[in-house]
């Protein structure tokens, strides 16, 4: 920007009518009218009295005003109202946080309006400069990443700036921000290392992508778009790992990579807490991203549930139930077509347990079983599935009976297993004797 263009106003002489008339004549031809006569410093000083909202409205009044405010923004990036500084890492109340978020949204609007005539490349430069001024996880050390709201504020800002941009522009924004922060390089290191090896980097990457791109999406389509940006450069096996990195169970300072292989959830709330976000993300990509085919969904869930080790069958059943009927059916049918009968029967019995634990209707399991049996070509495979499923239960209950430690687990698992088989049997008996029973 050429600042000389702001410096053309002459100092008017006092009590000089002729001079004033001359000024009036010149003012007529100036874009900012009388305001233009003031020296630049004074103009900028007056602008400091305006709120971000007012500045934002002013930028759309004329090109000259937009240039003036752009100059003001560039020369005073840290003015008290242009860049609120929330990064003392103290615990803020929700209303204090909301206040910051609102201000950053307004700053986004100001940036969006004042740069509306710029090329995307130049606008992205402003966005990146802004990020570098507020981020405190890269060059500066962040004292408390979990409670730091810097990235959340930037996320609010970014989402306001890119609202209404087309997909290719948003993709450029994603690429540029990731390049600038080295985020993709870190992701590459994480994906090519053993889980947990770079636990700090893993947590930082999770917070970065969630706070900047994913957590502020108002629409599910927007979230699906950003997810696909994050996933698109990686093969299925890495996409699954990324999904866990972003949404899997985590403690304050590490991702709990083995949680799904070692423990099951106690109740519905716990399973939603552990698996709900992953299921949501899969659902979101499956239903709202054209590039994510059905095969993609099946492969990623398959990879996800066998990483870093095979998940416990109950957790897989839980994830499928949370993903919704469309994805669960597709997964089960794919296993049936590929003849993975032992896996399938274990999964079906886990479905029964999950239904009992979460108070879902066991009819869901029966109708899923119908669909699976229908796609199996060989009658002997069908009978094998049904038999293995029941054998699985027998073994499970016997194991629980013999090896269960009542002090560690006070009979809960046995109770759920027996209840599951009882509920399933009741439903099957009702179907068998349907003709003889009341409607
Ligand atoms: Zn911080």
Image (cartoon, grey):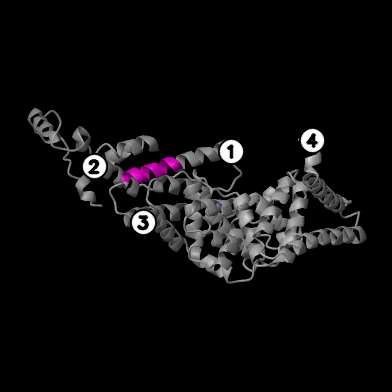
Q: Secondary structure at mark 3?
A: helix
Q: Secondary structure at mark 1?
A: helix
Classify mark 3: residues with Cα within 10 Å, few (<14), some (14-19) or many (20+): some
Q: Tell me the distance, in whole angstroms, between the alpha carbons under discs 2 and 4.
A: 78 Å
- Confirm if mark 3 falls within 8 A of ligand 1: no
Give the residue number, with chain letter if any, for mark 1. Answer: 94
Whichever of callouts 3 and 1 sits on the residue coming sooner in the sequence is 1
Of 258 and 16, the residue lying toward us: 258
Earlier-in-chain disc, 2 versus 1: 2
Q: Main secondary structure of the magenta part?
A: helix
Q: Is residue 15 left or right of residue 338?
A: left
Residue topped by disc 2: 63
409 horizontally vs 67: left or right: right
Residue beneath disc 4: 438
Residue 125: which disc?
A: 3
N-terminal label among 3 and 2: 2
Q: CA distance from mark 3 to mark 4?
A: 72 Å
- Name the foreground residue: 376 vs 199: 376
């Amino acid at each position: 920007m050429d600042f000389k263009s702001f410096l053309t106003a002459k100092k008017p002489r006092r009590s000089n009518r002729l001079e004033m008339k001359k000024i009036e004549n010149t003012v007529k031809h100036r874009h900012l009218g009388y305001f233009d006569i003031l020296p630049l410093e004074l103009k900028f000083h007056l602008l400091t009295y305006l709120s971000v909202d007012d500045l934002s409205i002013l930028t759309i009044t004329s090109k000259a005003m937009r240039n003036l405010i752009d100059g003001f923004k560039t020369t005073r990036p840290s003015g008290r109202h242009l860049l609120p500084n929330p990064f003392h890492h103290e615990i803020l109340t929700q209303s204090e946080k909301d206040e910051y978020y609102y201000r950053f949204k307004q700053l986004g609007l100001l940036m969006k309006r004042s740069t509306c005539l710029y090329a995307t490349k130049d606008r992205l430069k402003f966005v990146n400069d802004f990020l570098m001024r507020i981020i405190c996880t890269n060059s500066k050390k962040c004292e408390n990443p979990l409670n730091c709201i810097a990235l959340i504020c930037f996320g609010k800002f970014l989402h306001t700036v890119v609202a209404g941009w087309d997909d290719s522009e948003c993709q450029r924004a994603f690429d540029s921000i990731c390049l600038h922060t080295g985020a993709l390089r870190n992701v590459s290191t994480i994906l090519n290392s053993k889980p947990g090896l770079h636990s700090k980097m893993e947590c930082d990457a999770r917070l970065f992508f969630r706070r900047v791109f994913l957590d502020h999406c108002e629409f599910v389509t927007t979230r699906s778009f950003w997810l696909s940006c994050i996933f698109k450069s990686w093969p299925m096996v890495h996409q699954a790992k990324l999904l866990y990195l972003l949404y899997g169970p985590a403690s304050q300072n590490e991702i709990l990579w083995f949680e799904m292989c070692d423990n099951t959830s106690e109740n519905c709330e716990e399973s939603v807490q552990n698996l709900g976000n992953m299921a949501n993300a899969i659902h979101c990509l499956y239903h709202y991203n054209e590039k994510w085919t059905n095969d993609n969904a099946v492969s990623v869930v398959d990879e996800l549930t066998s990483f870093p080790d095979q998940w416990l069958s109950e957790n897989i059943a839980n994830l499928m139930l949370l993903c919704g009927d469309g994805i669960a059916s597709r997964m089960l049918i794919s296993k049936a077509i590929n003849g993975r009968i032992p896996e399938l029967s274990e999964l079906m019995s886990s479905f029964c347990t999950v239904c009992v634990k979460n108070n879902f209707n066991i009819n869901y399991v029966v109708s899923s079983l119908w669909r699976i049996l229908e796609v199996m070509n060989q009658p002997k495979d069908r009978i094998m599935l049904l038999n293995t499923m029941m054998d699985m239960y027998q073994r499970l209950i016997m194991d629980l009976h013999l090896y269960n430690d009542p002090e560690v687990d006070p009979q809960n698992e046995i109770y759920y297993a027996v209840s599951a088989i009882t509920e399933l049997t009741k439903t099957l008996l009702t179907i068998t004797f349907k003709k003889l029973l009341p409607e």
